[in-house]
Image (tube, grey):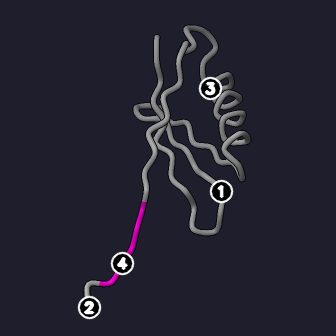
Amino acid sequence: MDEIIFKVDEELEGGYSASALGFSIVTQGDTMDELKSNIIDAIKCHFEVDMPKVVRLHFVHHELFSVS
């Protein structure tokens, strides 16, 4: 496998959560550095062989505003 993609959400309470597309891998982190480290740990736990060489992060930005 060459690449794995994670959808990253910024949590309202602070920090980040990430879930892999197509795999049952979910993790979180208070900072972006912690999230990346936790993603690497989760990948190593999930894949025994044929680990992805590249991790792509897809950021989701939620914004709420009033129309009135």
- Residue 14 in the image: above or below residue 36: below
**Who's the residue at 39% across and 74% down the image?**
64
Residue receiving disc 2: 68
Q: CA distance from mark 1 to mark 4?
A: 21 Å
Q: Is residue 57 left or right of residue 43?
A: left
- Residue 65 in the image: above or below residue 46: below
**Depth order, front residue of 44/15:** 15
Element at badge 1? loop
Q: Amino acid at mark 4?
A: Phe
Q: CA distance from mark 4 to mark 2?
A: 9 Å
Circle 2 or circle 3, nearest the eye? 2
Bounds of the magenta segment: 62-66
Q: Earlier in the sequence, mark 3 or mark 4?
A: 3
Residue receiving disc 1: 15
Element at badge 2? loop
**Who's the residue at 47% across and 24% down the image?**
4
**Who's the residue at 46% across and 45% down the image?**
59
Residue receiving disc 4: 65
